[in-house]
Image: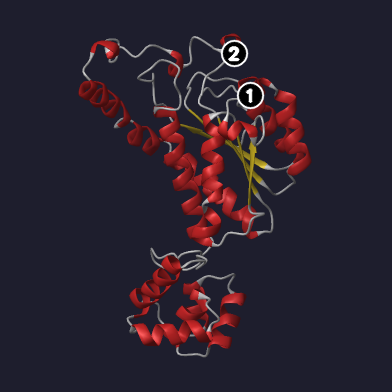
Amino acid sequence: MTVPRQAVHVDSPTERRNPRTTDLDQLSTLDILRSINAEDRLVPDAVAAALPALARAVDFAAEALRTGHRVHYVGAGTSGRMATLDAAELAPTYNAPAEWFMVHHAGGATAFSSAVEDAEDDEEAGAAHLRAAAAPGDFVLGLTASGRTPYVLGALRSAGALGARTGLVFSNPHATRLMDIDVLIEVDTGPEVVAGSTRMKAGTAQKIVLTAFSTAVMVRLGRTYSNLMVSMRATNAKLRGRTLRILREATGHDQHECAVALDKAHGDLKVALVHLLSGVDAEAAATALDSTDGHVRRALHALGADAV
């Protein structure tokens, strides 16, 4: 992701030259890779420092979805592409409804595969997109390495004015204009291996943050049981096999018993799981899940059964 020169601020760490990589073009191929890897290893600690703020964002998002609202991702360039990929993976992994997560990418669909760099400078476009799509009770998460991308800040400003909660993932401790955002997730990754190339450490940090964020939201909403993907859609042979394996691991029942339970549950892994763990029939298991917003543990508790 590049930033037009007129939008660059000298105090943005991602735009500075990295003193540890000034001889990058003189290194052997292996040493170039070692240099990149050494910088990449700094990213997890930077993310760890932001976890308390990220936890607030997760709780905001889970509350929004629990109450019938939506989560919006807003980004430009690399940030928008990261957001698009993260949202796309939630349906097959957690059977998340398509309307739960919306992505607003500066430049639209074209920007996913091709650079539309001037689109990130259009603050009013970001504001207009969220004005049309967001609602009170939603949660809007912006992503911008610089903390200054006009499209993203315009979107957050507009969403906040509508009554949505807002958050921002950014890598610039010197960014301004962020006071009206509900939760600031600052991941200070410092200067990049190649100055200004924020698809590197800043982009890696955004990938880690997004994966952790959306996974934690799904866990809070009961889309897992223990650390198992019990809400996934079994849309191919591999996933159907995984469904049986998960059911066996979660219950201790054999392959045949799990296959019969899945058949009785019409392929619904959660229903089959509650049926096998509680001993009630599939219909009662489905009713218990409906009454507990799909949480397996809560359904088992309501049925007086013990979770494994």
Mark toward the start of the polypeptide (2 vs 1) = 2
Q: Neighbour class for label 2 at 10 Å: few (<14), some, many (≥20)?
A: few
Q: Which mark is residue 81?
A: none
The amino acid at mark 2 is Ala
**236 to 290, vertically: above or below:** above
Left or right, 243 with reference to 22: right
Evaluate if marks 2 and 1 touch, with contact meaning CB atoms under 8 Å apart: yes
Q: Neighbour class for label 1 at 10 Å: few (<14), some, many (≥20)?
A: many
What residue is drawn where x is 60% and y is 21%?
117
Residue sitting nearer the eye, 55 or 133: 133
Q: x, y percentage for residue 64?
A: 64, 53
Tell me the quarter of the picture where residue 202 sits.
Answer: top left
The amino acid at mark 1 is Glu
Left or right, 221 with reference to 202: right
Q: x, y percentage for residue 82?
A: 51, 38
Q: x, y percentage for residue 53?
A: 48, 39
**284 to 52, vertically: above or below:** below
**84 to 226, vertically: above or below:** above
Number of callouts: 2
Provide the residue designation for mark 2. Answer: 7
Q: How far is disc 2 from disc 1 in space, using C-alphas?
A: 10 Å
Q: Residue 120 carries which label?
A: 1
Left or right, 158 with reference to 25: right
Dot 2: element: helix
Tell me the quarter of the picture where residue 51 sits.
Answer: top left
What residue is drawn where x is 29% and y is 12%?
25
What residue is drawn where x is 52% and y is 66%?
233
Dot 1: element: helix
Q: Can residue 305 be seen in this view?
A: no
Q: Is residue 88 visible?
A: yes
Residue sitting nearer the eye, 155 or 196: 196
Dividing the image into 4 quarters, which one contains the C terminus? bottom left
